[in-house]
Image: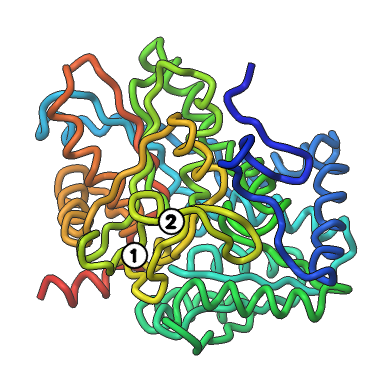
Amino acid sequence: MSVVKVTQDGVFGEGEMTFGGSFVPDVLQNALNRVAEAFEKYKDDPEFIREYHYYMKDYVGRENPLYYAKNLSDKLGGAKIYLKREDLNHTGAHKINNTIGQILLAKRMGAKRIIAETGAGQHGVATATVAALFNMPCTIYMGEVDMQRQALNVFRMELLGSKVVAAKSGNRTLKEAVDEALMDFATNHEDTFYLLGSAVGPHPYPLMVRHFQSIIGREAKAQILEKEGRLPDYVVACVGGGSNAIGLFYPFVDDLSVKIVGVEPGGKGISTGFHAAPLTAGKPDVIHGFKCYVMDEAEKCHSIAAGLDYPGVGPEHSYYKSIGRAEYLSVEDQEALDAFVTLSKTEGIIPALESSHAIAYAMKLAPTLPKDQIIIVNLSGRGDKDVAQVSEMLN
């Protein structure tokens, strides 16, 4: 029997500790209902699945490798570290797995326009990419601060033909970009499809994003069984909204021998309040139309990694925490920066700052374990987008 209990309305859990659902105005609920109906209709449709896997293989380049990071493992001592190489996907991150799935759904729903939100810009680039591929106009909302620190990705989105709109309220980061996108969707839902990038938001988005991102964990499971003849001892991923993490975790969730660890951004330190770690230091509340763990002081939300800079988290992660199936802890900015440099120098792989949080935790965990233990880390994106930001910090 599966560990995961989720209702038809996207509510995770039972009793008082429930997460997810949909807490939105009627006009938005009607639009969400249409998306949910289409998702249920097409997700198991043989032609939809065939088309999705065609693009995954011939356009995205899947399956990507599960790479044994021998140099890093030897340097640290202890457990073997394997990297699931989502950084090798077309557009450089896991985000494309979901944008292909959702735009195929949008096409079947007759949408004439695509909108999205983005933090680090990787989801924005992946959305702009599929909008260009399917010849659909696209508007992407991005926090003004994130546009400055991820200027390269802004240019990439515009080069691909999308319009990038700055969110200028509040912290001017990912939360505000989601606010703007939801307002657009509520106003223009008749002809617009909101291509949401993380496993957050009102139902059906958390389930839909998990569905398309689970290709990560399914591949990793088959690959580790082929390479090692057994399941890993740990699966580790960074958690902002949590799509790369839920994509890796979900196919392992019923394998109770596998420990699941989500790594949140500890920012400048949990005690300072300047972090983005709601599972570590937040409480259940409603944000952006769904219930999850939320930071007490959302206005202080901060991470060195723009893609993790969100005061809430996916409802399924909130549920895993509440039932004890996964452990969530935090890694501070400096630790992530150190991991960024270490992986680059030991393996010749420059990771995204987001992924560097998971690498940083694996670097602490591996030396504490026997050499026959196995850790799979989701290398959710490559660091090309971050090198200018990191260069400024190191010089």
Q: Residue furthest bottom?
A: 168
**What is the three-letter code of the residue carrying label 2?**
Gly
Q: Mark 1 points at which residue?
A: 305
Q: Which of marks 1 and 2 is in front?
A: 2
Who's the residue at 9% across and 34% down the image? 75
In which quadrant is the C terminus drawn?
Answer: bottom left
Q: Name the residue under label 2.
A: 240
* Apparent side of residue 58 relative to residue 266 in the rendered image (left or right): right
**What is the three-letter code of the residue carrying label 1?**
Ala
Q: Residues within 10 Å of mark 2 (few under 14, many from 20)?
A: many
In which quadrant is the N terminus drawn?
Answer: top right
Give coordinates of residue 281: x percent, y percent: 34, 54
* Apparent side of residue 116 relative to residue 256 in the rendered image (left or right): right
Give coordinates of residue 323: x percent, y percent: 49, 31
Of the numbered discs 1 and 2, the one sitting upstream in the chain is: 2
Q: How crowded is mark 1: few (under 14 residues within 10 Å), some or many (20 or more)?
A: many
Circle 1 SS class: loop
Circle 2 SS class: loop
Who's the residue at 50% across and 53% down the image? 284
Who's the residue at 22% across and 14% down the image? 372
User: Which is nearer the eye, 64 or 333?
Assistant: 333
Q: Can you tell which quarter of the image residue 18 is in? A: top right
In the rendered image, the vertical position of residue 185 relative to residue 75, given as above or below: below
Report the Cα–Cα distance between label 1 and label 2. Answer: 9 Å
Give coordinates of residue 239: x percent, y percent: 41, 50
Q: Are marks 1 and 2 in contact (CB under 8 Å)?
A: yes
